[in-house]
Image (tube, coloured by chain):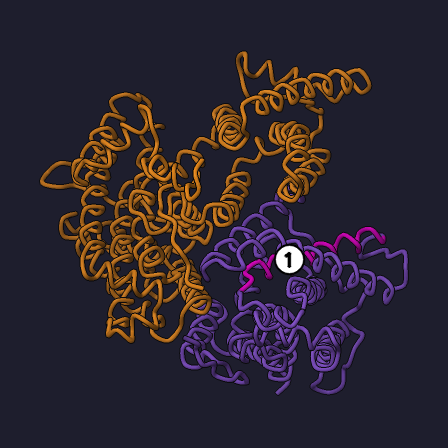
Chain colours: A purple, B orange
Amino acid sequence: MDFFVQQLVNGLTLGSLYALLALGYSIVYGVLGLLNFAQGEVYMVGAFIGFGVLSGLGGPASLAVPVPLALMLMFIAAALGSGALSVAIERIAFKPLREASRIAPLITALGVSVFLQNAVLLLLGPDIRNYDASSFIPFTSGIHAGPLNISLIRIIVIVTTFALMVALTLWVGRSKLGRLMRAVSYDREGAQMIGIDVDRTIMIAFFVGGVLAGIAGVMAGLVFSRVFQLMGFVAGLKAFTGAVIGGIGSIPGAMLGGMLVGLAESFTAAYISSTFQNVIVFAVLVVMMVVRPTGLLGRPTVGKV
Amino acid sequence: MSIGSDRWVETAESRTEGPRGWWGRGKRRWDSLPPLARLGLLVALAALVPLVVSSDFLVRIGVNGLLLALLAVGLNVSVGWAGLLDLGFVAFYGFGAYTFALLSSDQLGIHLPTLLAVPIVILATGLLGLVLGLPSWRLSGDYLAIVTLFFSQIFLELALNFDRLGVDLTGGPNGISGVDPFSVLGFEFSSPTSYFYLLLVLVAVIVTMLYIVDRSRTGRAWRALRDDPLAAEVMTVPIRRLKLMAFATGAAVAGLAGSLFASFQLGVYPLNFQVQFLIVIYAALILGGSGSLAGAVAGGIVVTLVLDLLRDPSQASAAFYGVIAVTLIARVRPWRTLAAVVAATVALGFVVHAVVGAIWPVAVTGEVQATGIFGSAIRSWVVLPEDPTTIGNWAFCALVVGVVALTRVSARTRMILLVPLLYLASFVWENRLVDEPSITRQLLLGVLLIVMMISRPHGLLGTRRVERV
């Protein structure tokens, strides 16, 4: 039982990261119908920005400011930096291809992904950076009651993710910008005709996606401690699948899908085989995508002729 | 000018005439040759390469180039013709290589003759292509891309971990070494030159076969499937069968390439089949022109040449400045502007070098990789700090920002901005990129994919396609 609860918490933590990334995929996909392969790289850059702030504030062992303030600063810097990067990627790699074939933006996204990985490798070198989160958020803090053993970091991650999801749902559902985004995603040409600034709306979608990825990156640093150039690729892959499994374009769907991928991963590692963990998770994801491409909460789309 | 006449109409004939002069005459004569004769000429020309170049290193590059060309030709079937974005292609290549290695090494103690092993590998990889092509029945576009990318990840994980389940099948991270070289009718392929000729023949054969397929009913049906799957299906094109055929054909070619690779390298290692190599294959196909056989072959050879030349710093510098020169000549018109830009850049370099050298002498004492006259010219032109890492990194960031800015300003500003950017580029190159060849290779591939897709999506040799609105 203890072990099961522990794995559940692990799965939810991991799932939170995937869910945030999946939300970013989902928003961009909803507005543009485009898979942004580079999202995983944006997440990686976010993690590095968070690390930069952390070392700027004196490093994990000797923080110059109170811990909550440091965390806030890390999250804000990573969110803004990643958001800006995401917008830049859209401008450079996707905007010129609005009218091109569907394959073209996928290939440029692949190019952006390779470029970012190696640019970071060139600038920062191959060393793995360590958040060493346990030295400023001790493992002993958090909930420790009977079988329940949840460290504060995991609580922060899970609670922040849920809060962000609620905020995002409200924002897309209630605010004017959210309405614009829904209009663009429903019918881009129609939206343009009634005077909506489509380019700006798409830019905002990319910015929000980048912000979420940046926050997820800092969380990844806090949870796993290790931050490196290749962390984004596979995480992005799994998160996108989460978005598809939940039903792409749907916010609760992305959340659900991300959580499911996280849970599947942690339970596979715990109960089946940690060697073939990725193989099994990938195989499950392939089967789910093939069996139900519209996702759990998505509605089947009817192709227009 | 009388009413009803129009310059555009008047000059219509000369525009359809195509290029003039010796270039135009040559091109027309070339185009009028039968395809087989064109292929034969190119093969004959390529066959001279090992006779002209003496070093094994260069012949090896030739072998790598032909291998990549073969892979790009295979990938072209599913991506270029059938329009199925297959990101699992590298798994077919790896599967072929591993299967060949298992059939002809001490790993399982099996040593099949080459003429038996290769057909088995091709058949097995083709079958794998059929199976992994099945998701394309239900998924298309991005979803198919993701699922196939999962396949390549699964393959890699299996190759890395299949040494722990009782049987040591793949050798884990160490791979399988000691793979037999090809041996046909008593002749053992041992030198790079022999592999070069073998590959040359095989590439020619495969290209001919695929050319025939492309011209056939199947080829036309693939293009119909690519351009509009729904319309194709409505017109009773059997799209499911065609999708599987495209996957299987591409996979079979990859299997052949894999077995050649395994025997040429005398081993297979998981690192050879990572996503990075998938990007290389895609770069070759996109550069040459997706959908064009000649493009795929040319792309494979050019990409290999550029990437392999980067391994050797002095050749890398020549390649770098060569590419910049060619790009400038092709893009900057008229020639007066070109001359002005080049002169301004050279002048700027000497001025900056002199000023910086006077203020801060340590900044010009760094090492330069190029040798000879060229190297000493570079040394007195580019600022070379003693410890270039930090400033080189900032310069790299500035260069990326500058290049992006270059695409957003007016033509006149662009020419002015070009001068400092060219200098900055060579600064970053000499101080940072030249020391990190493997990173530079990947950076170049990424940039290549982005730039090609945006500025010339049909590649160097492909034909422009009109997209459906």
Residue B125 is situated, as x and y percent measured from the top left of the image, at 26, 59
**What amino acid does circle 1 point to?**
Met
The front one of B331 and B273 is B331
The front one of A96 and B63 is A96
Q: Which residues are magenta?
A: A35-57
Q: Quadrant of the N terminus of chain A?
A: bottom right
Residue A192 is situated, as x and y percent measured from the top left of the image, at 62, 68
Residue B10 is situated, as x and y percent measured from the top left of the image, at 38, 38
Residue B100 located left or right of residue A42: left
Q: Is residue A220 visible in the rendered structure shown here?
A: no
Residue visible at 71% across and 84% down?
A148
Crowding near the residue tagged with mark 1, few <14, some 14–19, many ≥20 C-alpha atoms within 10 Å? many
Q: Quadrant of the C terminus of chain A?
A: bottom left
Q: Quadrant of residue A66?
A: bottom right
The residue most toward the top is: B373
Q: Quadrant of residue B136?
A: bottom left
Q: Quadrant of residue B41?
A: top left
User: Mark 1 belongs to which subunit?
Assistant: A
Residue B235 located left or right of residue B364: left
Which SS class for mark 1? helix
Residue visible at 45% across and 36% down?
B307
Residue B455 located left or right of residue A290: right
The front one of B177 and B232 is B232
The residue most toward the right is: A65
Q: Which residue is mark 1?
A: A44
Residue A278 is situated, as x and y percent measured from the top left of the image, at 48, 68
Q: Is residue B412 above or below residue A95?
A: above
Instruction: Count the marks.
Output: 1
The rendered magenta stretch, by its main secondary structure, is classed as helix
Residue visible at 36% across and 63% down?
B84
